[in-house]
Image: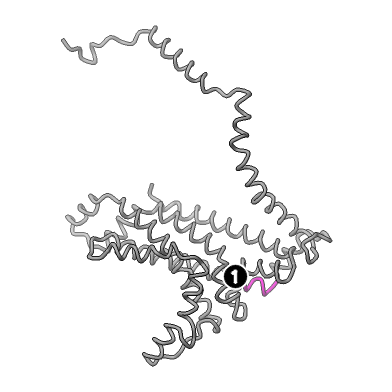
Amino acid sequence: MLKSPAQSTPTSPVSVEKTKSKLAEQEAKFTLNAKDKYFAWAFLGPSLLILGVFIFYPMVKTLYLSLFLTNTVGKPTVFVGISNYINLLTSADYLSSLGVTLFYVFAVTIITIALGLVLANLASKRLPGIGLFRTLFSATMGVSVSVAAIFWLFIFNPSTGFLSLISTWMHLPQIPWLTDPTAAMWAVIITTVWMNLGFTFLILLGAMSSVPTTLYEAANIEGASSRFQFFHITIPSISPTLFFVSIITLIESFKSFGLIDLMTKGGPTNATNMLVYRIYKDAFYSGNYAQASAESIILTIIIALFTLLQFKVLEKRVNY
């Protein structure tokens, strides 16, 4: 005859003591002893060495150099404290580069995420040829910076470029993409968005694919429109992924260098002279390592502040 849970025999004190003793024995097996620290250092040592040599030491050295004047080979000569920082923050040229960088970063981040959302939403539908569509828009992930720069330089070429030929065919005025300050900035923004779009598209498409279909089925039964479903079901459901993508895109935009170096070299008239490219020119063209070090520290602080701001503002809207 089966016993009900109420009729079952309660656990005896002896069995409780046995269970406790067994748990204590198992915990004792995982207790660290003096010899374990050598194994810990053996496993962590290579990683700590690499981080120390290639990350922590350069960071400390950069901070150190920013407090000195340096000669042309980067050796500190005179201690000046925070004078390098004051000179930069009161320089109209540096503030202009800062403004250009902020405009570029915000434009790239907003356009990349917006286009990634639209394309991922289209690719999540069951449409004819959607597999080819997904492949085309994720293919930019395999394109190097140099290849992308050469490709878009051909497109923006004022005489033989694709855009020039289209403008001639449609009898539209020619746009000097790489010689006009405003057009050059937008040329770099378009190229950067094209480069970043593949990664953003794939990440957002994966997030949309994981949204439960039952939510959309219930919305369809209630007669909700596609637009309502996108803004009230899709966006809230993928908000953690959007949060991640926004942080990654913003940080990578601040660090843009290759496309600027290959396409405009900071010109024309410093219209695309971003902070990273300015650091490169000050250090390796002008030999002013102290100023370049101070610019690096300021850029690090700016990126940290914007990242912290994103966590404070955007994380509140994330639905986990």
- Magenta run includes residue 93: yes
**From which residue to which does the magenta span run?**
91-97
Residue occupying the far bottom of the picture = 171
At label 1, the amino acid type is Met
73 to the left or right of 246: right
Give the quarter of the image for residue 201: bottom left
Say how the picture is coloured. Answer: one colour
Q: Where is residue 106 in the image (x, y as percent from the top left)?
A: 50, 67
Q: Is residue 156 above or below residue 99?
A: below
Instruction: Examine the residues drawn in magenta and state their main secondary structure.
Output: helix
The residue beneath circle 1 is: 274
Give the residue displayed 40% in from the left and 11% down from the top. 16
* Direction from residue 252 to residue 292 in the image, left or right: right
Q: Residue at x 53, y 79 (%)?
A: 184
Residue 168, image x, y percentages? 40, 91
Residue 188 belongs to magenta span: no
Q: What's the residue at 25%, 11% (across, down)?
A: 8
Q: Residue at x 22, y 65 (%)?
A: 128
